[in-house]
């Protein structure tokens, strides 16, 4: 999925769960046109765990976005709609 972010020149950092990162931290943290966006990658049929839901809630409360993606197409749709939104508001590159 990171190739899609690279293709659109989107800054990102990937997370691997460890004792230092805490539970439920999204798989990818990125910045799209100056906005904080977290991405959780799930297989079809998988659900977010309680710790992931808690992290998502904290990100939303802080003004960030959280998305769950199950395919490259999901991620492309998020990138496209985000760019359209920011283009309409005059924000972004």
Image (cartoon, rainbow, N blue to C red):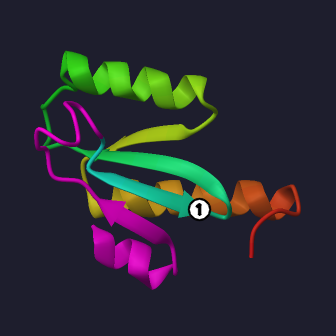
* Most common secondary structure along the magenta stretch: loop
Q: Is residue 62 above or below residue 92?
A: above
The residue at the point 54 percent across, 28 percent down is 60
Q: Is residue 28 above or below residue 61?
A: below
Dot 1: element: strand
Q: Nearer the viewer, residue 29 or 84?
A: 29
Residue to which mark 1 is pinned: 32
Q: Is residue 65 above or below residue 87?
A: above
The residue at the point 75 percent across, 68 percent down is 92
Where residue 46 appears, as percent x and y from the top left, is 13, 31
Q: Is residue 57 above or below residue 33?
A: above
In the rendered structure, the answer to whether residue 28 lies left or right of residue 8 reads left
The residue at the point 11 percent across, 43 percent down is 18
Where residue 70 appears, as percent x and y from the top left, is 24, 48
Magenta stretch in the rendered image = 1-25
Q: Residues within 10 Å of mark 1 (few under 14, many from 20)?
A: many
Q: Quadrant of the N terminus?
A: bottom left
Query: Number of labelled discs?
Result: 1
Please tell me whether residue 4 belongs to the stretch shown in magenta: yes
Please tell me whether residue 68 belongs to the stretch shown in magenta: no
In the rendered structure, the answer to whether residue 43 lies left or right of residue 31 reads left
In the rendered structure, the answer to whether residue 4 lies left or right of residue 88 reads left
């Amino acid at each position: 999925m990171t190739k899609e972010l690279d293709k659109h020149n989107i800054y990102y950092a990937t997370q691997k769960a460890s004792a230092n990162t805490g539970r439920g931290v999204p798989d990818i943290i990125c910045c799209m046109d100056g906005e904080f966006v977290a991405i959780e990658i799930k297989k079809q049929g998988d659900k977010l765990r309680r710790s992931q839901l808690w992290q998502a809630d904290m990100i939303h409360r802080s003004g960030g976005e959280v998305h769950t993606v199950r395919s490259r197409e999901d991620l492309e749709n998020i990138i496209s709609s985000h760019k359209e939104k920011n283009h309409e508001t005059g924000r972004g590159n």
